[in-house]
Amino acid sequence: MSRPPGVQNERTSLAWVRTGLGFAGCALLAGRLAIVRDEGWAVGAALAAALLAVGVLGWSHDRYRRAARRLAARRSVDFAFPALVLTLAVVGVGLLGLLLIAL
């Protein structure tokens, strides 16, 4: 069964949006912990996660448009560097989350 071209681009874009929304949720939770525990560095973690959320959501829109243009031109859609950066950001926020919970 053949799928229409561009469907994989839609799924990837939705995955980036879900990741951005996950970062927004992490920002809210870190902000809540900052208020409850009254720790200044938790505010930094909340701000970092919020900035990542905004960045990922903006990046997903840009990535979708660029990939759609490349698919229309029948060119390769290989954006490995943004995926690597996003992976490192997820790991970093995860480690900050573990620190927030553990301390």
Image: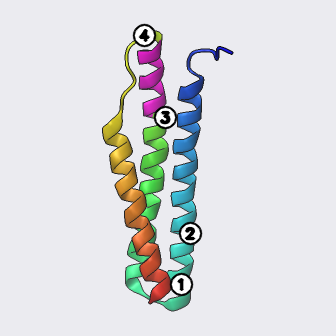
- Comparing 77 with 21, the one in front is 77
Amino acid at dot 3: His
Dot 2: element = helix
- Name the quarter where the N terminus is drawn: top right
* Above or below for 46 versus 14: below
Residue lying farthest to the left in this orientation: 81
Picture residue at 65% right of the left edge, 14% below the top: 2
- Comparing 44 with 100, the one in front is 100
Cα–Cα span, label 2 and label 1: 11 Å
Whether label 1 touches label 3, CB < 8 Å: no
In the rendering, which numbered label is found on residue 68?
Answer: none
Cα–Cα span, label 4 and label 1: 51 Å
Q: Which residue is mark 1?
A: 35
Picture residue at 59% right of the left edge, 34% below the top: 11
Whether label 2 touches label 1, CB < 8 Å: no
Q: Which residue is mark 4?
A: 74
Q: Position of residue 24 (x, y in %)?
A: 54, 59
Magenta region includes residue 65: yes
Observer-side mark, 4 or 3, equals 4
In primary-sequence order, the first of circles 2 and 3 is 2
Dot 3: element = helix
Looking at the magenta stretch, what is its main secondary structure? helix
